[in-house]
Image (spheres, helix red, strand yellow):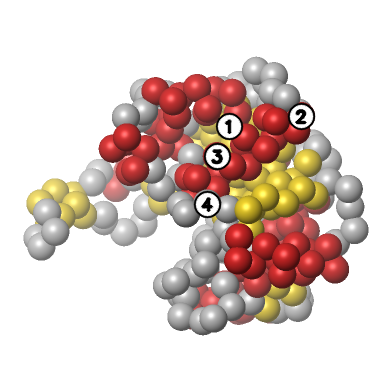
Amino acid sequence: MIYAVILAGGTSKRFGKTLPKQFVQVGKKALLLWSVSTFLEVAEIAKIVIVLPEEWFEFGKHLVLSNVRTDKLQFVSGGATRTESLLRALHFVQESYGLKDEDMAVTHDAARPFVRKDHIVRSIELCEKSWAATLALPATDTVGVSDGEKLVSLTDRSRTFIVQTPQTFKIKAFLELYERLAEDQRASLTDATGVFILNGQPVAIVEGDPTNVKVTTEFDLTIAETIAELLSK
């Protein structure tokens, strides 16, 4: 089976508002509802697990269920970190439905409202032939590495990508590879692909879309509102 995991468990400390960004209105609907609506269009997905912050759990659940009617939705409280939230969702799937080797999770950040259906489908197709796939954009800027104060090296731009979501992977493989990581490796994780890469497993690339922006700041929200307006025309 294929499960979607929409990560909306953060409290948006960098966003600068009392209301977490995933619940803020963008265009005609809340940020979270944009991606929920798109994932519901993907027939291959059996269940959608939405991870919500514990202190906003009932608020977020009511928001979604007031706007969406489907039996595909499940809700889980998030953890202290993105990785912990993802693990909670995967363990929920494991405990509720059991796991087969081929079962997949399509994970996505609710902060990226404009995910495209064809990208979700393509990531599933690539994951069927491998362990994991991610959306990523070829870097158009030179990316430097610093020692904290000065640039000490530059990446090869022709081989550098800006990683996005969704990220799709075989669930059993992810959980097994995560257990192999040392504590410092687990602490360094910022997304699902790291579990595979740190174990020496390559991740397939689906070329992303510049409109698949991540809303982190109020400036990002302004960009998202502009995109939402363009998409509504």
**Secondary structure under badge 3?**
helix
Residue in view at x 14 percent, y 49 percent: 153
Amino acid carrying label 1: it is: Phe
Pick whichever of labels 4 and 1 is earlier in the sequence. 4
* Mark seen at residue 97: 2
**Secondary structure under badge 1?**
strand
Q: CA distance from mark 2 to mark 1?
A: 17 Å
Pick whichever of labels 2 and 4 is earlier in the sequence. 4
Name the residue tied to disc 3.
87
Q: CA distance from mark 1 to mark 3?
A: 13 Å
Q: Is residue 218 above or below residue 199?
A: below
Q: Is residue 209 visible?
A: yes
Instruction: Give how far across and how far down residue 190 sits, in percent.
Output: 41, 47
Q: Is residue 120 left or right of residue 204?
A: right
Pick whichever of labels 1 and 3 is earlier in the sequence. 3
For the residues bearing labels 2 and 4, Cβ distance under 8 angstroms: no
Amino acid carrying label 2: it is: Tyr
Near mark 4 (Cα within 10 A), the count class, few <14, some 14-19 or many ≥20, is: some
Instruction: Give how far across and how far down residue 202 sits, in percent.
Output: 43, 27
Pair 1/3: label in front: 3
Q: Is residue 230 visible?
A: no
For the residues bearing labels 2 and 1, Cβ distance under 8 angstroms: no
Q: Is residue 200 above or below residue 221?
A: above
Amino acid carrying label 4: it is: Gly
Residue in view at x 50 percent, y 22 percent: 176
For the residues bearing labels 4 and 3, Cβ distance under 8 angstroms: yes
